[in-house]
Image (cartoon, helix red, strand yellow):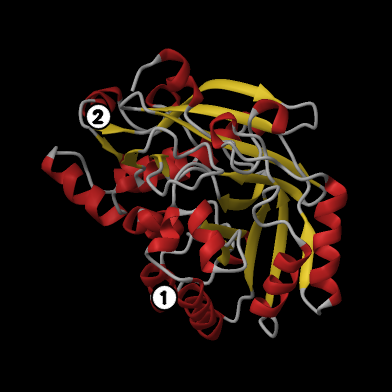
Amino acid sequence: MINILDLSIEELKEKLEQLNIKPFRAKQIYDACFQYKDYDEVSNISKAEKEILKQNFNLLPVSIYKVQESKDGTIKFALKCNDNSIIESVLMSYKYGYTICVSTQVGCRMGCSFCASTRNGLIRNLLASEIIGQILCVNKYLSNSTNERKITNVVLMGCGEPLDNYENLTCFLNLVTNKDYIAISERNISISTCGIVPNIKKLADDGYKINLTISLHAPNDEIRKQLMKVANAYSIKEILDACDYYFEKTHRRVYFEYTMCKGVNDSEDNAKELAKLLKGRVAHVNIIALNAVKEANLETVNKKDAYKFCEILTSAGLSASVRRTLGADIDGACGQLRNKILDETGNK
């Protein structure tokens, strides 16, 4: 069955006419979707029409399955799609408002050694409706209102590689920035990619100006290949060239994530090499002390070492900071999101 938000309003009008429903209903149905109303909550459509719609369309692409709250206030949501797939989203509270970290795939095929999301491989891509559904569902949970938008920022850093699901990603971006609905600015949207070079360039060519974050995690290709399978497809030079292209097109500085793994990429020489690699770029480095993933066989560093690494970068003239860890006690921190409910039940 089709999720409404996977159709444009014009496409929905055509389908409604085929069902002998007046096309002006399309706007009312779209409004209901963005307000995250189910059929029983929609009052401006007749009962007879709703019965026809129920047989053909889903209004709600995801629903809350389980909620966990961290001691630091971070909330992790397990959300169920209409095919019973489970995905995870994480809500973080800041002074400026709420940021939500959303998933773009069920599982992931990138195979990064430090990441939990890839443990069961890729099950399927999420639809655009299922990506934006995470935001709409959690926003309604926060405010219990159909009109108030509490979520101000979106990061596509949950399960999956966003640029491996390019068509649904860009459909989502068109939906989430639509000025007639939740209208989240591109400046408040960030995407994290392990470095799918052609699609980094395509994102710029297609006119999107969201914040680009590269999961770099190494100062050279040799170390990167130990940590990330994608390094066998794209070299660091190719990725940096794509980042330069993105900056030229969008004028948005690029962010680089660097997860520190003890004895792998955490030495002073690694920091100096990274500083030399990125010197002169309009960029910022987010340093992350590895968050525990039991199957990874990698050790984290202590905060003192992370700040020392950061100091080497800043002394060399780079913009850099150590990322604060949120939600680690509920497996909601960077690299920890996974389909754990499926792991526990064995339901693949």
Residue 56: where, in percent of width, then height? 21, 31
Looking at the rendering, in which quadrant would you find the C terminus? top left
Give yes or no for contact between labels 2 and 1 (Cβ–Cβ under 8 Å).
no
Nearer to the camera, 281 or 78: 281
Q: Residues within 10 Å of mark 2 (few under 14, many from 20)?
A: some
- Residue 160 is tagged as none
Query: In the rendered image, which residue does mark 2 sit on?
Result: 49
State which tag comes first along the sequence, 2 or 1: 2
| Amino acid type, residue under disc 1 in the picture | Lys
From where the camera sits, is residue 325 visible?
Answer: yes
* Left or right for 198, reference 303: left
Q: Of tags 2 and 1, which is closer to the observer?
A: 1
Residue on which the image places disc 1? 201
- Can residue 180 be seen by looking at this rendering? no
Residue sitting farthest toward the left: 18
Residue at the spot 44% in from the left edge and 44% down from the top edge: 131
Residue 199 location in percent, x, y? 38, 68
Name the residue nearer the viewer: 48 or 161. Answer: 161
Q: Amino acid at mark 2?
A: Glu
* Nearer to the camera, 301 or 35: 301
Point 55% across, 49% down: residue: 157
Q: Is residue 315 above or below residue 264?
A: below
| Residue 43 spot, x, y in % from top left | 42, 28
| Front residue of this view, candidates 148 and 185 | 185
